[in-house]
Image (tube, helix red, strand yellow):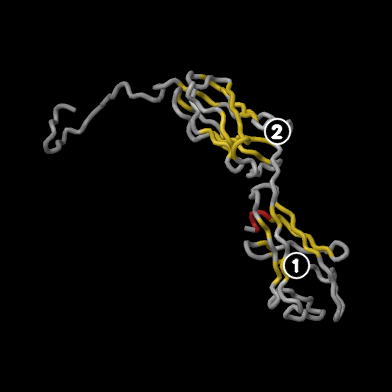
Amino acid sequence: DWTDHIQGVTVDAGGSVTIGSPTITDVSIFIPISAGNLSVGDGSSQEVTVAVYLNAGGLTDGAVLSFAIDGTVPGFTADATGSSFATPLLLGDVNSNDFTIDVEASKIGFTTQPTTVAENAVLSPSVVVSYLDANDNVDVDYDGLGAGVTLTTTGTFAGSATTTADAVLGQVTFDNLLFSAAASNITLTASDDIGFAVIADVVSNAFNVVAAGSGPQVNDVIINEYDAGGFPGFNEDAV
């Protein structure tokens, strides 16, 4: 999906070419070139380089971008005051190389933060720590044994809690976090198990562990009045 990945376009023909705002869709890019900014003499040729630059965030690591110009209907439009382009293209379709997006992690981060949980209950939704680049794109190359994260806490983990897990496609999911004591405003600290100095520890948002059974309770029911109009089969004098 080009709209998810491509932010903009530049054009060069031995020097920067002034263009208007390109229209980028899932399947095409339309590049308007201001009149007089790209001139090609009759019967001659001009090498033009079209480059794209990516969005900062929302990228998919390993996604492949590939571009083509249809040889039969290339979509070129000449200025009305000039000559037209000869079609079909002499050498047929023009196809680019494949360009693979490569996200390089420089940090880890909590992509799913901890939330309030009862003591000795499994925290839900599960906490997720991801390997991220500077723009918070996930690096899927961190995968499997050897790529993992360990959690510590300012609270108290239950003995059965799982606090170390391996990454799967750049994300480490902790689906068995339990706490044995109620506490307020505690945090988790995630540490990269690989031990690369460039990947620093990261601290989660603060959250609470509440005592088991401390949720809302109904102690009394008070009835101020009732309608004695009667219902078949019910005693009107008692509730």
- Amino acid type, residue under disc 1 in the picture: Pro
- Residue 77: x percent and y percent? 74, 75
Identify the image quadrant of the C terminus. top left
For residue 199, the mark is 2
- Residue 127: x percent and y percent? 54, 34
Query: What residue is rendered at 57% in x and 41% in y?
Result: 168
Q: Residues within 10 Å of mark 2 (few under 14, many from 20)?
A: some
- Amino acid type, residue under disc 2 in the picture: Ile
Q: Quadrant of residue 227?
A: top left
Check contact, mark 2 vs mark 1: CB within 8 A.
no
Query: What residue is rendered at 59% in x and 27% in y?
Result: 151
Q: Quadrant of residue 71?
A: bottom right
**Is residue 44 found left or right of 100 in the rendered image?**
right
Identify the image quadrant of the N terminus. bottom right
**Is residue 49 found left or right of 75 in the rendered image?**
right
> Which of disc 1 and disc 2 is earlier in sequence?
1
Mark 2 residue element: loop
Gap in angstroms between the C-alphas marked 2 and 1: 43 Å
Depth check: 32 or 43 in front? Answer: 43
Q: Nearer the viewer, mark 2 or mark 1?
A: 2
- Residue 172: x percent and y percent? 58, 36
Query: What residue is rendered at 13% in x and 31% in y?
Result: 235
Mark 1 residue element: loop
For residue 32, the mark is 1
Depth check: 160 or 67 in front? Answer: 160
